[in-house]
Image: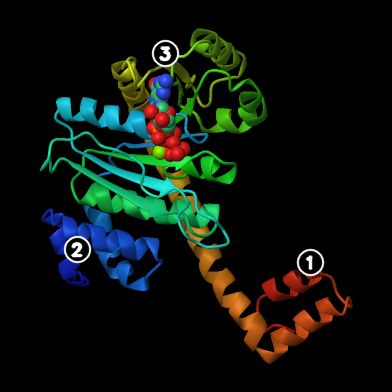
Amino acid sequence: MTRAAPIPAAARAILDGDRRALARVISQIEDRDPTAAPITRALYPRTHAVPVVGVTGPLGVGKSSLINLLVGRLRALDRTVGIVAVDPSSPYSGGSVLGDRIRLDRPAGDGGVYFRSMASRGEAGGIAAATREVTRVLDAAGFDVVIVETVGSGQVDVAVRDVATTSVVVLVPHLGDEVQTLKAGLFEIADVFCVNKADLPGADLARRDLAELVRLGAGRAGWTPRVVSTSTTQPAGIDELWENIEAHEKFLDDSGQRPLEERRRLSSEIVELVRERVGRRLSDRLERDPSLRGLLDEVVARRIDPRTAAERLDRPGPPR
Ligand SMILES: Nc1nc2c(ncn2[C@@H]2O[C@H](COP(=O)(O)OP(=O)(O)OP(=O)(O)O)[C@@H](O)[C@H]2O)c(=O)[nH]1
Ligand SMILES: [Mg+2]
C-alpha cells in the first residue's frame, strides 16, 4: 500500500474553517497558479458532492438579488452557503468589468455564508474548470450548498451545466426576442426557469409563455423544467424557487441521474484540462521548436493548410 501524501498546511487550514486560507487558494485557482494543485488534490477526497446551484441569465435580470434572498432562505433552514460569482471580463484587459456587485444582507459575523467573486479570464471551458475547482474547495470547506452566479452570454451559460447540479435560468418580462434567440441554448441549460421582476407589468404573460414553451419541448432525461415567478423587491416566490431547486436535486437522487451527471461533468472537466495543457505546450513549441516552426512556415506560405498541419501534429511519434 502506498502511503498517503501529507496534507498541505493550507488544505488542513481550509478543512478547519480558516477563511483566509480559503480566500488564498481561490485566488490561486483564479490565477491558474500551479501551487494550488497540491491543495486541491488533498481536498478532493474530502468533498461530499454537495448541491451546486447555477444561477445564470442576461445582465441585470436580478441574479444577485435573488441569490441574496435564497441565502436568507437557506440560513433560515440552517444550511450554510458558499457563493461564487463569475464576472464577465473584457478579453482585452483581462480585468473584471462589473466587479463585485452582489450585496448580501447578512448579519455581521455570520460564518455560515461565504461570498467570493472571480474574474472569468480565459475560455469558457477553462472558466468552467476553474469554477468547478472553486466549488469543490467550498464543498471541502464544509458549506452545505454552493451557489454559482454567471452572466448568461453564449458560451458561459452552456458552461454552467458543467459546473452546477441544478441550473436556474433567470429571465424578466419583455425579454420576448431574447427568449426566442436564446431558446435552444436555454432549454439545454435550465432545470428551473425563474421569471424575476414579477412586480413589473407583463410578468404573468412571460411566465405563461415560458411554461408553454417548456410544455412543447420534451423534458431532458425525465425532468421537465419548472417555471417560477419571483420578485426580489416585494419579495415574492423565493421559497417556491428554493423548493423547485430542491425538487430537482431530489429528482437527481430518485432517478439515478446524479452519478451519471457527475461522471459527465468530470469527464468534460478532464478533457478541458488536457486541452488547456496540450494547447499551451503546443503553442509554445510552435513558436520555439525549429521543426514545428518550419511546419508553421509552410502554412503561412500556403503550401499546406492548417488542417493538414494539425493532422501532422496529432500523429503519434515525432512531428514531421
Ligand atoms: N422591479 C424589480 N427590480 C429588481 C428585481 N430584482 C432585481 N431588481 C433590480 O434589477 C437590478 C439588477 O439587479 P442584480 O441583482 O444586480 O441583477 P444581476 O442579474 O445580478 O446583474 P448582473 O450581475 O450585473 O448581470 C437592480 O437595480 C435591482 O434592484 C425585482 O424583482 N423587481
Ligand atoms: Mg449580479
Q: Which residue is mark 2?
A: 11
Determine whether the residue tagged by mark 2 lies in a helix, strand or loop. helix
Mark 1 CB within 8 Å of ligand 1: no
Image location (x, y in percent) of residue 142: 18, 46
Label 2 to label 3: alpha-carbon separation: 45 Å
Image location (x, y in percent) of residue 127: 47, 54
| Lower position in the chain sequence, tag 3 or tag 1 | 3
Q: Residue type at mark 1?
A: Arg
Q: Which residue is mark 3?
A: 199
Q: Residue type at mark 3?
A: Asp
Q: Residue at x 47, y 59 (%)?
A: 95
Q: Residue at x 63, y 87 (%)?
A: 288
Can residue 26 be seen from the camera position used here? yes
Q: Residue type at mark 2?
A: Ala
Say left or right for 208 vs 246: right
Residue with the most extreme right position = 303
Mark 3 CB within 8 Å of ligand 1: yes
Vertical arrangement, residue 304 with respect to residue 185, above or below: below
